[in-house]
């Protein structure tokens, strides 16, 4: 945020050529500020910074970066209980990306953001269609298409697999979700702690839906251990939600053990 304010002051006196570059820097700093507030579960403040990033990228004429910001806003809307807005924002992001031309990897990621929103609405048909479009675009991205922007390079085959599983878990289709998320966790690097914490949570959630209490508590324990290392309120909130989902099994030994670990780790 301090860097964003500093760049804002530079913009006031910058010449035209430099001003364009500074707007790009400011847009990314605003997006990062929004993402930090999103991870802190301060959704209204996060939305303010995302809107600032969107305006800056629009002024700069960077449609691909606009798609990036809109995808963040879509995910925020899904978390904030506004799935209809999340669908609309994901579709706006897709339109912004299409304006640039062929960007299959970007489109693959954006279709999965749309799938998350449809899953939150429990619209199974729309969710599955969005997942299918995401897979098709990912396959196209492996051909001779233009190089994708840096900000979407994280979206590889493992991420596609995990996010598809998360969409199914959100939708209430745990039998489809569990093997996909489990395979994604198996492939991920151990140093990807934040992502693995989220994915372990979703694996535990799917296993709990399937009645696999021991496996769910083991996965929840993995998420808890990772959460203690990264200090993310959003991850901690997921784990607390998982604990609430375990209330029907509150007297079972695996749940009691997990609850004790959670008290020690999160207070």
Image: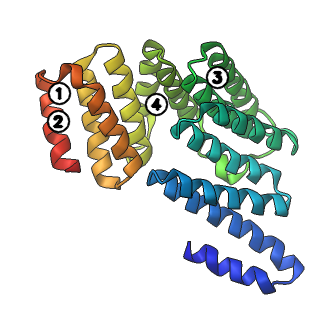
x then y, percent, for residue 257: 13, 32
Q: CA distance from mark 1 to mark 3?
A: 33 Å
- Circle 4 residue: 184
- The nearer-to-camera label among 4 and 2 is 2
The circle drawn on residue 159 is none
Q: Which secondary structure lies at badge 4?
A: helix
- The nearer-to-camera label among 1 and 3 is 1
- Circle 1 residue: 255
From this view, report whether residue 193 is shown above or below residue 29. Answer: above
- Circle 2 residue: 259
Q: CA distance from mark 1 to mark 2?
A: 6 Å
- Circle 3 residue: 131
Is residue 219 among the parts visible in the rendering? no
- The nearer-to-camera label among 4 and 3 is 3
Q: CA distance from mark 4 to mark 2?
A: 26 Å
First along the sequence among labels 4 and 3: 3
């Amino acid at each position: 945020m301090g860097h964003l304010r500093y760049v804002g002051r530079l913009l006031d006196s910058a010449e035209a050529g430099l001003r364009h570059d500074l707007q790009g820097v400011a847009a990314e700093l605003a997006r990062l500020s929004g993402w930090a507030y999103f991870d802190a579960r301060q959704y209204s403040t996060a939305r303010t910074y995302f809107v600032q990033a969107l305006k800056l990228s629009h002024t700069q004429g960077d449609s691909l970066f606009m798609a990036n910001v809109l995808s963040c806003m879509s995910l925020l809307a899904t978390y904030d209980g506004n799935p209809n807005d999340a669908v609309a924002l994901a579709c706006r992001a897709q339109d912004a990306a299409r304006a640039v031309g062929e960007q299959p990897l970007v489109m693959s990621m954006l279709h999965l953001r749309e799938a998350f929103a449809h899953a939150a609405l429990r619209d199974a048909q729309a969710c599955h269609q969005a997942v299918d479009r995401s897979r098709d675009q990912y396959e196209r991205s492996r051909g001779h298409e233009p190089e994708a922007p840096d900000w979407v390079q994280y979206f590889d085959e493992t991420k596609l697999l995990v996010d598809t599983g998360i969409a199914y878990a959100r939708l209430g289709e745990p039998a489809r979700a569990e093997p996909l998320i489990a395979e994604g966790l198996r492939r991920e690097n151990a140093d990807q702690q934040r992502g693995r914490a989220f994915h372990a949570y979703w694996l535990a959630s799917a296993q709990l839906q399937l009645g696999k209490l021991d496996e769910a508590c083991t996965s929840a324990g993995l998420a808890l251990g990772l959460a203690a290392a990264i200090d993310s309120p959003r991850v901690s909130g997921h784990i607390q939600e998982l604990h609430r989902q375990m209330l029907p099994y509150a007297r079972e030994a695996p749940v009691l053990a997990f609850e004790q670990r959670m008290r020690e780790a999160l207070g």
